[in-house]
Image: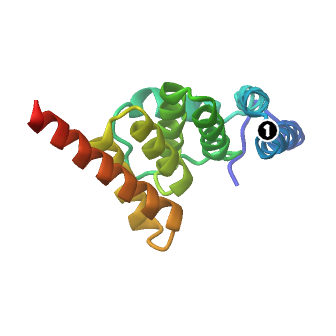
Amino acid sequence: EEVYASTTKEEIDAIVSSVEDQKAKGNEAFTSGEYAQGVLFYTMALDRAADLPDAISVTEKLSNGGSSPSSSKVEQLFPRHIVLSNRSACFLKLGHHEKALKDGSDAELLDPTYVKGMFRKGLALHAMGRYEEAIKCLASAQKLEPKNKQIKQALQFAEVRMTQEMRKRMQR
């Protein structure tokens, strides 16, 4: 177990507990269809997680990671990628596709094996009409979870939409 010189285990546990509370409230809001409220709670969870001593390595990964996620997972005291993915789902429901894409991409950067982050990134790309990118993203998610019906359905839908777009362009 890594020890952080500046923060005691009790302080870390208190922060993690606070983050978990905010995440749980975000989950409740999402389940109730209160997506804007969900965004607020997930944002508060992420803000609180920024007080954890691992925040520097997380921030570095997000700012340096940029366009292509490496296969390395960031060791985190709290799984921020889950909160980012959940907030991405709220943004998708609210129609804020750019923000959903950013959160889905950040979740994927922090944990390239987390399917829900990848899936939400794919849904955001689809919603933005970026079907080719959506297909690549959703196909990667499907490789990780081949039996997931939601991913399969989204992938098929993106392929249909891309085909329709190509036909439209050819008719012009």
Q: How many marks?
A: 1
**Hey, which residue is sitting farthest bottom in the picture?**
147
Which residue corresponds to mark 1? Answer: 26
The answer to whether any part of residue 136 appears in the image is: no
**Residue 54 visible, this orientation:** yes
Q: Position of residue 16 (x, y in %)?
A: 81, 41
**Please, what is the three-letter code of the amino acid marked with disc 1?**
Gly
Q: Tell me the quadrant of the picture where the N terminus can be found.
A: bottom right
Percent x, y of residue 3: 72, 45
Q: Is residue 148 left or right of residue 85?
A: left
Q: How is the image coloured?
A: rainbow
Quadrant of the image containing the C terminus: top left
- Disc 1 is placed on an element classified as helix
Query: In percent of the image, x 47 and y 44: which residue is there?
Result: 123
Residue 19 sits in which quadrant?
top right
Quadrant position of residue 34: top right
Residue 33 as seen in the image, left or right of residue 106: right
Front-lying residue, 110 or 104: 104
Task: Mark 1: give few (<14), some (14-19) or many (20+) Cα within 10 Å.
Answer: many
Q: Nearer the viewer, residue 133 or 165?
A: 165
x and y, in percent, of residue 117 in the image = 53, 47
Of residue 39 and residue 171, the one placed in the foreground of this image is: 171
Which residue shows up at 77% across the image and 39% down it?
33
Of the pair 57 and 37, the residue shown nearer to us? 37
Please identify the quarter of the rendering in which residue 11 is found.
top right
- The relative height of residue 13 versus residue 113 in the rendered view (above or below) is above
Classify residue 54 as left or right of residue 102: right
